């Protein structure tokens, strides 16, 4: 869920990432496809850098079509327009069958920082290592940012055990929505990362994506969702296809595909059926009380 500024030369596509999933258990970090960026493309990228911010990753790892690793790339994002509603989730908890989504608070920073010391995750998310102090500053920035909605993904089974555990001990990953189109506030880019190895391949990414889509539609007014995935990340592509996403574009520069889901009435009914078990509850910072 971190923002990263990366020069265009570093904006290579990644396989797997926080919104997508990418390779079988025990496999290497996945195929990282280097984009052959021509001089003209670099020039365009540099000309776009002013006034834009960098952002996270997407993805998951591939087991039975489910992704657990970032699949996007470090790329520039324009700031959202009139998107104050993106902070609505700061007091919201979403309870599913497998995962619990909670706002990203300072309690979660140490574990998140530990995850991001992994060279593999740094590579997949196009991130640079931060100090713990910088990580806390990043968390505060993300908490207040108006163009994104971020939840930490918790393991629901652990979270509901007794005695009540800390949220940090239940952390599995994160899920995000970004406003990616200044001219269309109803479009959100979804990203998911299951960073905790023991939580991969268990359906956490799929449910986290579904809960986030439901929340984005009902609370943020989103009617279209996009996922950007490295072309070599077939498991992530299959996962989003199972969630009714359709391929709409291919980038030869970043070697990634863009998949989109437009919420027709039939799709809304389908999403409601997939998430009718979801409970929305008030969240208190640091609260781990399951009930």
Image (spheres, rainbow, N blue to C red):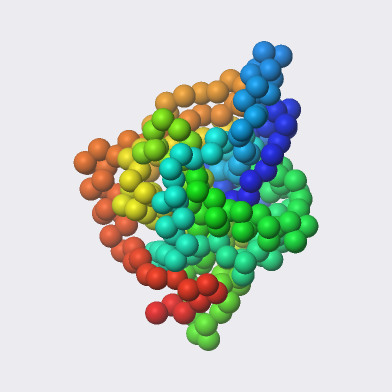
255 in relation to 229, above or below: above
Residue depicted at x 33% and y 46%: 221
Q: Where is residue 256 in the image (x, y as percent from the top left)?
A: 56, 29
Frontmost residue, 192 versus 4: 4
253 in relation to 69, above or below: above
197 in relation to 166, above or below: above
34 in relation to 118, above or below: above
Residue depicted at x 50% and y 45%: 147
Q: In which quarter of the image is the C terminus?
A: bottom left
Q: Position of residue 231 (x, y in %)?
A: 56, 30
In this rendering, the count of numbered labels is 0
Residue depicted at x 49% and y 40%: 80
Q: Position of residue 176 (x, y in %)?
A: 50, 50
Frontmost residue, 62 versus 44: 44
Residue 72 visible here: yes
Q: Position of residue 193 (x, y in %)?
A: 56, 51
Residue 37 visible here: no
Instruction: Name, please, the residue furthest toward the bottom.
Output: 163
Residue depicted at x 61% and y 33%: 51
Q: Is residue 281 left or right of residue 65?
A: left
């Amino acid at each position: 869920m971190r923002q990263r500024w990366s020069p265009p030369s570093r904006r290579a596509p990644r396989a797997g990432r926080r919104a997508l999933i990418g390779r079988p258990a025990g496999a290497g970090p996945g195929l990282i496809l280097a984009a052959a960026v021509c001089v003209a493309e670099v020039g365009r990228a540099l000309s776009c850098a002013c006034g834009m911010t960098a952002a996270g990753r997407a993805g998951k790892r591939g087991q039975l079509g489910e992704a657990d690793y970032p699949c996007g790339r470090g790329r520039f994002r324009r700031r959202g327009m009139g998107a104050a509603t993106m902070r609505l989730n700061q007091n919201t908890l979403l309870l599913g069958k497998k995962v619990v989504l909670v706002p990203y608070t300072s309690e979660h920073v140490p574990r998140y920082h530990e995850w991001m010391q992994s060279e593999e995750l740094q590579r997949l998310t196009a991130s640079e290592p931060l100090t713990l102090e910088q990580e806390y500053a990043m968390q505060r920035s993300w908490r207040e940012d108006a163009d994104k909605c971020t939840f930490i993904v918790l393991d629901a089974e652990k979270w509901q055990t007794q005695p009540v555990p800390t949220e940090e001990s239940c952390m599995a990953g994160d899920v995000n929505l970004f406003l990616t189109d200044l001219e269309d506030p109803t479009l959100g880019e979804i990203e998911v990362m299951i960073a905790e190895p023991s939580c991969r391949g268990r359906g956490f990414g799929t449910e986290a994506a579904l809960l986030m889509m439901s929340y984005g539609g009902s609370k943020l007014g989103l009617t279209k969702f996009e996922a950007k995935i490295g072309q070599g990340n077939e498991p992530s592509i299959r996962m989003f296809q199972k969630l009714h996403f359709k391929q709409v574009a291919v980038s030869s520069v970043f070697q990634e595909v863009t998949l989109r889901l437009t919420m027709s009435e039939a799709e809304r009914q389908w999403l409601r059926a997939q998430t009718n078990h979801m409970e929305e509850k008030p969240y208190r910072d640091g609260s781990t009380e399951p009930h």
